[in-house]
Image: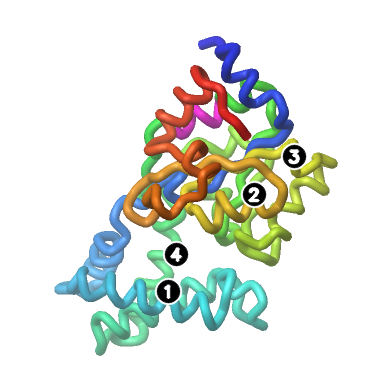
């Protein structure tokens, strides 16, 4: 399908377009259910999924505070150990008494399965929007607060080939909304901030982070954690916020966007 003249005009100032991944292009199916089914398969039945979900939220926050960016700066930890420790903490909280060997088995299995299509689904119109950016001749990349396994996830979901690069916070050494993560692709590609557009679902991490770095940005509201009420948005953000990627694409194709 040919690109509309309005789509080309809206994007003519940009040489680079980047995307967030989680809850922007891809969505986790049901993490608590996956934890329960994995534990059951490893011989630990009768897990309370609601309690486990509460424990996950609690311990993810603790791990993120004590060892930010998936343990990037914690000596002798690394991202794999970070996730294994998190799973261990979650099950000790939600289902105490599991023997050590079982805990290790569950954690190792979850580390593997969460990098596969068994745990992820495409958000509607994601692949189409990314392809449209490529068809417009843009350099298209990923900027995501994620560990290095993101390339494996994108390959599993048949999206990796659509991107010119994938930049994770772990690789960058800083997380969105830090200006430093947005500067890296600009330096690599010799592109000015005004020539870059970032698309994501978090108002603070993606939209504000990009704009504070001199970029333009678009915000998509995909699910409860991505939803932002209109009263919380500044005047410019209201015009750059969309209920879905489909609505974003339709607007890019038919209406003028004021950057």
Alpha carbon separation for disc pair 1 and 3: 35 Å
C-alpha span from label 3 to label 4: 38 Å
The residue sitting at 30% across, 66% down in the picture is 35
Instruction: State how far apart marks 2 and 3 are (Cα).
Output: 10 Å
Query: Mark 1 — residue?
Result: 60
Is residue 91 left or right of 192 when viewed as pictured?
A: left
Mark drawn on residue 111: 4
Please name the residue that numbered disc 2 is placed on.
211
Q: In this view, does 178 lie above or below 5?
A: below
Binning the other alpha carbons within 10 Å of mark 1 as few (below 14), some (14 to 19) or many (20 upward) gives some
> Are the two marked residues, 1 and 2, in contact with CB atoms closer than 8 angstroms?
no
Which residues lie in the magenta part?
126-131
- The location of residue 206, given as percent across then percent down, is 56, 52
Residue sitting at the far left:
46
Residue 213 forms part of the magenta stretch: no
What is the spatial separation of the Cα atoms under label 1 and label 2, in whole angstroms?
A: 28 Å
Judged by depth in the image, the label closer to the viewer, 1 or 3, is 3
């Amino acid at each position: 399908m040919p690109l509309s003249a309005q789509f080309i005009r809206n994007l003519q100032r940009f040489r680079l377009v980047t995307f967030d991944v989680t809850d922007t292009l891809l969505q986790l199916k049901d993490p608590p259910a996956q934890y329960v089914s994995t534990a059951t398969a490893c011989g630990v039945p009768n897990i309370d999924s609601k309690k486990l979900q509460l424990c996950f939220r609690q311990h993810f926050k603790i791990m993120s505070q004590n060892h930010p960016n998936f343990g990037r700066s914690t000596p002798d930890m690394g991202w794999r150990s970070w996730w294994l420790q998190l799973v261990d903490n979650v099950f000790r909280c939600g289902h105490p008494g599991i023997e050590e060997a079982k805990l290790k088995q569950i954690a190792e299995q979850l580390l593997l399965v969460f990098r596969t299509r068994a745990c992820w689904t495409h958000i509607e119109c994601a692949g189409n929007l990314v392809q449209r950016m490529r068809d417009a001749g843009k350099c298209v990349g990923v900027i995501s607060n994620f560990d290095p396994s993101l390339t494996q996830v994108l390959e599993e979901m048949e999206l990796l080939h659509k991107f010119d690069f994938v930049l994770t916070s772990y690789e960058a050494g800083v997380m969105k909304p830090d200006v430093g993560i947005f500067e890296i692709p600009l330096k690599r590609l010799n592109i000015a901030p005004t020539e870059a557009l970032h698309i994501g679902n978090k108002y603070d991490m993606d939209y504000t982070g990009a704009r504070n770095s001199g970029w333009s940005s678009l915000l998509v509201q995909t699910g409860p954690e991505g939803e932002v009420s209109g009263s919380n948005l500044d005047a410019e953000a209201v015009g750059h916020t969309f209920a879905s990627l489909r609505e974003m694409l339709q607007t890019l194709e038919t209406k003028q966007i004021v950057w």
